[in-house]
Each structure stands twice: as structure tokens, then as C-alpha cells.
């Protein structure tokens, strides 16, 4: 078999190469009738002599060929050393690629300050990559110690390094344009919500429910909790009693315990992953249930569905802490403040509007959607007036808009009423409601196509009413990409295209569909990328594995988004940091392009977008100058790296 293969390979070798030619020459010389007539029946001895002389001849020919090869190679080395054609071709190839890069238009327009800022940030980034006080993971045989980190490695593990880095300091100051994918309950962290829940006003009306009695240590680890504002005469239970009944439907008991009582009775000997100042034991414990932790996210036994389950428990816990009148009102102004400090100038928020009411602080009144949206409008206006009076209106000139969200898990009948409610709300608040989305894990039913006829009817109705409520579906936020079924044909990426989505949430799986990539570009559908969310929900291992460089290189318009910053302990600044360190090809020009797309693909009017871009360009120039002033000398002092 081996011999067979050798023969075949030799047969296919081109003439003039290796053994084939030598063998042919040998064969010809041995068979040359003029020099050696073919002997018949030669005696054994002379046959051996012929063989020996053939071997000698063979090695002589071989050595001649080797010498020839050596001479030829040497002269080629000399020739090529003097010939620059390859390097010219390579440089031309790189230049060609550069001129086709997705960030080229932004680079092309870059001011001198921006070009300098680009060099500074790249130099600092590459130094931080190898700086042992920040990351310091160098290629080598030494096994790194426990403190060594990879730049662009796991987000939650890397957070202390990120917060020490200058790239992050710069990312925080970068003018980011709009924040287009942000779940309503997730802008502010638990530490700012707890003081309200523990305030004197809420002492008799803020309740907690657990899915099991809290007795053994494992109960504390495994229970799920939710909060609710209820009237002060609500029947209560003791969650620490082994006979505690968590059943909401029970005829004999109520599962609710006053949060104030719960905090007082909470044990003091439980360990927490993060200790937050000014938070008591119960709050620290609850906080860990609400946010994704290092342990819960990266534990070797954690699964994709497992991390989604933790995430869903977190969102359910947030809901009760936030969805009541007092804090709802307080939240809007503070969410805007938090966005301003993150250099965001406009946002489209996604509240889940399947629940139709939120309670008043005393738990006795229910505020419907109309009242909730009125609060939002009033608080936006209040903030605008405040900003205007301080001469700061350009920091947040257009307020917020709302994308109506409902779960993908509901029956079709329920979807009909949801679509109806969305239209009603749009008619009541035409400037506030700007889109419609289906939320929930995409690996669970239903896919967008399950409701296609209802969604088409919704679009037609909007056209008839002369209103615009574009779809902005969560789509492609999945590795399976089968729309919660076992059939790849159910991917939400098909329906988002056919239903004419304005943008899609995530789009992580889009590269599986080269045809759709082209169609999304042709239809100008923008992707709301959320890299940290995708890592923490187990779509990828870290920022370096996220497909954003490929999605951008494919020519798709993308934006960066924090999705659920309070659950992920992140911010939009962290997202911009992550994409800068996740791919060495990311530039400050790319940052600018992403920010500009976030304005261009927003639901602002054309006129507002024009104004927003103007403000952004001005702020951008100021930002680049600040980078040069603040970090120019520092970067000059850093050695040039290969
Ligand atoms: O990334 C996401 N993909 C899908 N659904 C999400 C995501 N983030 C939040 N939600 C869902 O939106 C609702 C309100 O916040 C919650 O039900 C939450 O599970």
C-alpha cells in the first residue's frame, strides 16, 4: 500500500523535480545501447558489478543536482534580496484592504487631533496588553501566576484590570451618541435601588417573596426572590420559618414578608462575592441574586440555559424593586444622569409592557400604561428644563424614547392584544413610542415567524393610521439560531428581514447566513451589538471571540449597547473598551463610526439626527484634543513596540 502511494506520487511529480529526473537519467544511461549493449544471460558477478556502478552513478548524479540546487538557491537569495517586488505587492495589498475597511470613511475624515489620538490609544493599548500591573500575559513557557490576565479576556474577571487601564479612562470620556438597546429596568444598579426600598416611606409596603424557606445555607443559594409593593395590611409570613409556604395561590397563607422585617432577621454569617459599602447583609445577598456573578457565570458546571436561568431570575427580582410609582419617577431623571455621565446623548429604552400596571407607593392604587408613560414624559421634560437652565441641553437634547416590548413566549391571542395596546400607546404618546420588540431567550419558543401574520397586520394598520412603529426584534442572539425549535428554518433572522425590521437586537448569528448579510445591508438594517451581554450569557468566551470584527468587516452597520448594564455590572463605556481591546484592528475612527451609526439608525427625525451629528462632531473633536493633551506625553514616553 505504502509502495503504491509512493509510485503514484512519483508519477504525478512534475518533470525536472527530485528523484524522478535522476531516475530517468539513470534509466536512460543504463539502457543506452551505444555505450552498453544489452547483455543476455549475464553471469551473477557481472550483474552485481552493473548494479554497483549504477548506484555510484546514481549518487553522483544526485550530488550534482544538490550542488546545482544550492547554487541556484544562493543566486536566487541574492536576486530576491535586491528585488522589492514582493514587498511592494504586500504593501499594495494591505493598502487595498485598508481602503476597503469599514472604518475607512471615518478615518478619512479624521482631523489631526483624531489621528494623533488614534496613535496614542493604540500605543497605550499595546503597552497595557503586556503590562504586568494590568494584564501582563506574555507568550512564553512560564505558567502565569494567578494575578496574570489576558487583555480582552473574561469581562467580570478582568474588571479590576479594566478599571486600572487608561484605555478605559479614555473610553469613559468618549462621546457615544445614542444607546439603542437597553432594557428599561436595567440602567441603574441595585445599590441605588435599595436605599429607596429601605426608606421610611416604603417600610410598611415593600415586600419580598422567596421560592423556598431560608433555613439551610443551600436554601440561601438556591432560592429565587421577587419584590412587590403591596398595601400595609397585607398578610405576612416568615421566610426563615421552615414551614414557610411560597405558594401565591394558597388559601391559608400569604408568601410575602415585609422587606424591613426580612432585613432585620437576615443571618450575618453568609459570605458574599462582592461587599458593597452601605449595603446590609440581606441587600448584599439579594444583590448577588440580581446580578451575574463571576462564580455563577464562569463556573465550570455552568451551562448556557443555566446562565439564562440566573439572568431571568435577576430580571424578575429587579422588576419589583423598580416598578412602583415613586421610584419609577425618580428613575427616569437618574437614568438620564447616568447616561450623561457615560457620554450618551440619547436613548431608546425597552420596558416589558405585558404587565399593565405598577403600584403606587402605598400599594393601593394601580397606575396603567398611560400613567406610566405620562410619568416618563414629565420626568424627561423636567430633566430637559434643568439641563437647559444650566446651559447643558446639548448633553441630552432629545430625551428618551420607548420601544414596546412583550415576551416571545405568549400565545397568539395574547399577542393580538399586545399589538393593539402598542398602537393605542403610540396614538397617546406619538413622540415617545418608537418601536416594537419581542424579548426572551431565543432558544425558547416562539420564533418571530409564529406571529408573522399578526405582525404583518400590525404594519398594515400602522400604515393605515399613518403612524410608524418599526420592528426592532431580538434576532440572532443565539448559537443554535433555530428560533427556539429544532429546525434551523425557524431562525428569527429570516423573519426580521421579511418583516422589515429597522434594527435587530444582537445579530450575533448573522454570519451563518451570507445571503442575509447582503440583504441586511441592502435593506439598511442596523445591528444592536451587545458584546458583554453575549459573553455573560455564554454565546462566546470573551470579547476576543465575539464576531463583531467580522460583522463590521462584512459591511454591516452596527451599534454598541449595554443591554442590561445593572445585571452585568457594566456600562456603555465598558462596551467601547471591550471592542477596543478585543481586536487589535479596532481604532478610534471605528469608535467614531459606531457612535455616528447609533445616531443615524435611531428613531429621531432626520432634522434631529442632523443636529445630533453636529453636536457629536463638535464633542468628538474636543474629545480627541483631550486625549492628545492628557495622554500625548505619556504615550511619547512609551517604547515603540514591534
Ligand atoms: O438580551 C436579551 N435578550 C432577550 N431578552 C432580554 C434580554 N435582556 C433582557 N431581556 C428580557 O427583557 C425583559 C425586560 O427586561 C426581561 O423579560 C428580560 O428577560
Image (cartoon, grey):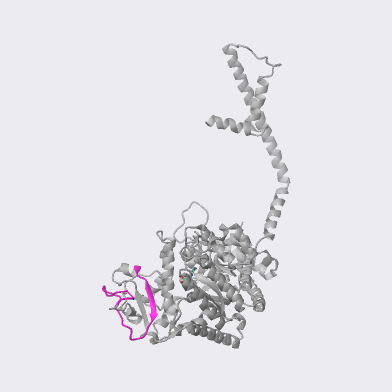
Nearer to the camera, 265 or 268: 265
Quadrant location of the C terminus in the rendered image: bottom right
Is 340 or 256 nearer to us in this picture? 256
| Range of residues picked out in magenta | 221-250
Task: Judge whether residue 102 can be spotted in this image.
Answer: yes
Q: Is residue 243 magenta?
A: yes
The residue under the point 73% across, 46% down is: 83
Residue at 70% x, 50% y: name it: 87
Magenta portion: prevailing SS class: loop
Left or right position of 346 against 213: right
Instruction: Identify the image quadrant of residue 639.
Output: bottom right
The part of the image, by quadrant, that contains residue 286 is: bottom left
In the rendered view, does 81 fall on the left or right side of 464?
right
Report x, y in % for residue 272: 37, 70
Q: Does the magenta stretch include residue 455?
A: no
The percent coordinates of residue 614 (x first, y second) are 67, 77
Q: Where is residue 40 in the image (x, y as percent from the top left)?
A: 62, 12
Residue 63: tell me if it is visible.
no
- Residue 365 % position (x, y): 42, 86
Amino acid at each position: 500500500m505504502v509502495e503504491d502511494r509512493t509510485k503514484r506520487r512519483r508519477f504525478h511529480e512534475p518533470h525536472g523535480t527530485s528523484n524522478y529526473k535522476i531516475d530517468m537519467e539513470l534509466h536512460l544511461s543504463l539502457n543506452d545501447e551505444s555505450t552498453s549493449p544489452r547483455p543476455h544471460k549475464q553471469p551473477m558477478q557481472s550483474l552485481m558489478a552493473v548494479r554497483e556502478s549504477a548506484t555510484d552513478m546514481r549518487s553522483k548524479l544526485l550530488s550534482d543536482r544538490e550542488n546545482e540546487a544550492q547554487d541556484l538557491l544562493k543566486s536566487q537569495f541574492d536576486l530576491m534580496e535586491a528585488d522589492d517586488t514582493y514587498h511592494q505587492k504586500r504593501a499594495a495589498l494591505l493598502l487595498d484592504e485598508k481602503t476597503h475597511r469599514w472604518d475607512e470613511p471615518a478615518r478619512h475624515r479624521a482631523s489631526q487631533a483624531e489621528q494623533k489620538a488614534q496613535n496614542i490609544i493604540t500605543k497605550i493599548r499595546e503597552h497595557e496588553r503586556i503590562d504586568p500591573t494590568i494584564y501582563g500575559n506574555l507568550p512564553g513557557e512560564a505558567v502565569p501566576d494567578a494575578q496574570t490576565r489576558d487583555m480582552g479576556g473574561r469581562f467580570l474577571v478582568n474588571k479590576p484590570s479594566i478599571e486600572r487601564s487608561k484605555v478605559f479612562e479614555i473610553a469613559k470620556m468618549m462621546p457615544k451618541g445614542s444607546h439603542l438597546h437597553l432594557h428599561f429596568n436595567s440602567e441603574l444598579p441595585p445599590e441605588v435601588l435599595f436605599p429607596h426600598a429601605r426608606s421610611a416611606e416604603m417600610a410598611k409596603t415593600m415586600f419580598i417573596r422567596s421560592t423556598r424557606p431560608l433555613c439551610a445555607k443551600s436554601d440561601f443559594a438556591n432560592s429565587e426572590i421577587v419584590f412587590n409593593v403591596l398595601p400595609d395590611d397585607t398578610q405576612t409570613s416568615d421566610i426563615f420559618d421552615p414551614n414557610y409556604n411560597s405558594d401565591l395561590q394558597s388559601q391559608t397563607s400569604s408568601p410575602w414578608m415585609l422587606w424591613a422585617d426580612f432585613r432585620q432577621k437576615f443571618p450575618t454569617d453568609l459570605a458574599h462575592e462582592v461587599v458593597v459599602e452601605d449595603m446590609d447583609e440581606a441587600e448584599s445577598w439579594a444583590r448577588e441574586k440580581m446580578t451575574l456573578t463571576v462564580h455563577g457565570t464562569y463556573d465550570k458546571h455552568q451551562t448556557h440555559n443555566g446562565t439564562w436561568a440566573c439572568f431571568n431570575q435577576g430580571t424578575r427580582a429587579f422588576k419589583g424593586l423598580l416598578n412602583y410609582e415613586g421610584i419609577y419617577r425618580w428613575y427616569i431623571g437618574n437614568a438620564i444622569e447616568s447616561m450623561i455621565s457615560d457620554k450618551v446623548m440619547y436613548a431608546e429604552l425597552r420596558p416589558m409592557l405585558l404587565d399593565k400596571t405598577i403600584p403606587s407607593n402605598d400599594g393601593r392604587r394601580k397606575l396603567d400604561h398611560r400613567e406610566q408613560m405620562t410619568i416618563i414624559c414629565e420626568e424627561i421634560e423636567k430633566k430637559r428644563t434643568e439641563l437647559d437652565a444650566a446651559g447643558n441641553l446639548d448633553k441630552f437634547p432629545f430625551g428618551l424614547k420607548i420601544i414596546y416590548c412583550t415576551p416571545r413566549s405568549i400565545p397568539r391571542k395574547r399577542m393580538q392584544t399586545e399589538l393593539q395596546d402598542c398602537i393605542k400607546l403610540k396614538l397617546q404618546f406619538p413622540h415617545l413610542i418608537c418601536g416594537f420588540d419581542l424579548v426572551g431567550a431565543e432558544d425558547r419558543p416562539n420564533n418571530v415567524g409564529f406571529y408573522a401574520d399578526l405582525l404583518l397586520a400590525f404594519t398594515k394598520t400602522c400604515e393605515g393610521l399613518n403612524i410608524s412603529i418599526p420592528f426592532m426584534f431580538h434576532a440572532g442572539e443565539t448559537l443554535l439560531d433555530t428560533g427556539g425549535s429544532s429546525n434551523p428554518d425557524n431562525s428569527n433572522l429570516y423573519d426580521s428581514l421579511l418583516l422589515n425590521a429597522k434594527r435587530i437586537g444582537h445579530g450575533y448569528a448573522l454570519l451563518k447566513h451570507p445571503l442575509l448579510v447582503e440583504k441586511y445591508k441592502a435593506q439598511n438594517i442596523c445591528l444592536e451589538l451587545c458584546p458583554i451581554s453575549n459573553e455573560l450569557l455564554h454565546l462566546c468566551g470573551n470579547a476576543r471571540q465575539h464576531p463583531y470584527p467580522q460583522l463590521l468587516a462584512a459591511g454591516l452597520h452596527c451599534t454598541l449597547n449595554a443591554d442590561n448594564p445593572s445585571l452585568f455590572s457594566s456600562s456603555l463605556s465598558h462596551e467601547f473598551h471591550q471592542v477596543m481591546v478585543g481586536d487589535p484592528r479596532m481604532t478610534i475612527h471605528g469608535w467614531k463610526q459606531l457612535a455616528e451609526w447609533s445616531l443615524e439608525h435611531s428613531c429621531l427625525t432626520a432634522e434631529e439626527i442632523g443636529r445630533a451629528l453636529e453636536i457629536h462632531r463638535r464633542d468628538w473633536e474636543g474629545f480627541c484634543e483631550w486625549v492628545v493633551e492628557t495622554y500625548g506625553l505619556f504615550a511619547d514616553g512609551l517604547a515603540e513596540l514591534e
